[in-house]
Image (cartoon, rainbow, N blue to C red):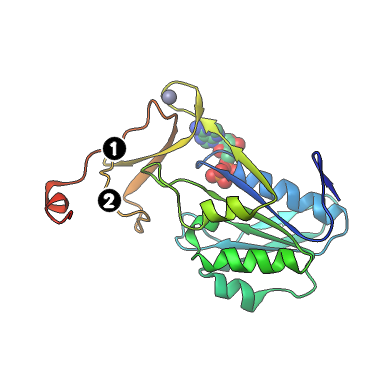
Amino acid sequence: MSVGSFQLNGGWIEVIAGVMFSGKSEELMRRVRRAMIARKRVQVFKSHLDDRYGGVFTVGSHDGRAIEAVPVDSSHQISLRLDPAAQVVAIDEAQFLDTGVIKVANELADRGRRVIVAGTDIDFRGEPFGAMPQLMCVAEIVDKLHAICVMCGSPATRNQRLIDGKPARYDSPIVMVGGAESYEARCRNCHVVAPPSEQSQLFTP
Ligand code: ADP
Ligand code: ZN
């Protein structure tokens, strides 16, 4: 199997990383569709931690075959719901899964599967998100995609979290459930993280 300049035999891991709106899901679906055209057996998982990110989605191919993503909220669920005959295993929104996903991805690749993992590699503070950094390390191939900064039009590498239209504070939770916040793609220069609230600073050792 040739991927770009790589010649790969057996299984491997490829990671599609980048900020929100950088087209990771589009790229994952493109690769899944191509694998289906090549008559590979494909299984897609998607973290459904939050309805805004989740929801079951369907990946269709031009020959009329369609594949549904299996919603999961832990790496264990991937193991439980794995199709043993799947030759290609894709996992979307991997940043929301526990670090067990690293072992699952490695074991699948060791057993000859092509594993495609997509996820946001940095959180709203610009720091490594969940298992994504380790997944990028163990992967054979890593692609880092960029969005467009909504402020200046440069390539965006940061997720700007806004709460009531203002930059979120550093101590705001990494994963917010409930939908009170919104996100913008921004470059490093336009990305703003507000300092932690005074109350939380009192508890900083
Ligand atoms: P991801 O999975 O990385 O969040 P998606 O594949 O869901 O990305 O969405 C990518 C799409 O988002 C782009 O094709 C584009 O239509 C749209 N989009 C919205 N805002 C932006 C932005 N600031 N920069 C680039 N694309 C954007
Ligand atoms: Zn910018």
> Is residue 69 visible to us here?
no
Give the residue displayed 62% in from the left and 68% down from the top. 104
On the rendered structure, is 143 left or right of 185? right
Q: Residue at x 50, y 41 (%)?
A: 19
Residue 95 against residue 168 in the figure, above or below: below
Q: Which residue is mark 1?
A: 167
Q: Residue furthest bottom?
A: 80
* Of 78 and 140, the residue lying toward us: 140
Answer with the quadrant where ligand 1 appears in the image.
top right
- The residue sitting at 40% across, 41% down in the picture is 126
- Taking depth in this image into account, of 117 and 39 the one nearest to the observer is 117
Q: Amino acid at mark 2?
A: Ser
Where in the figure is residue 151, as x and y percent of width and height? Answer: 41, 24
Furthest-top residue in view?
Answer: 152
Say which label, 2 or 1, has the lower sequence index.
Answer: 1
Q: Position of residue 124 (x, y in %)?
A: 38, 44
Left or right: residue 84 versus residue 146 is: right
How many neighbours does mark 1 have within 10 angstroms: few (below 14), some (14-19), or many (20 or more)?
some
Residue beneath label 2, please? 172
Q: How many marks?
A: 2
Mark 2 lies within 8 Å of ligand 1 (Cβ measured): no
Task: Give the structural element (helix, strand or loop) at label 1.
Answer: strand
Q: Amino acid at mark 1?
A: Pro
Q: Position of residue 32 (x, y in %)?
A: 74, 53
Q: Give whichever of 30, 135 is nearer the camera.
A: 135
Q: Which of the 4 image quadrants contains residue 163?
A: top left
The structure residue drawn at horizontal position 45% and vertical position 52%, both measured from the top left corner, is: 129
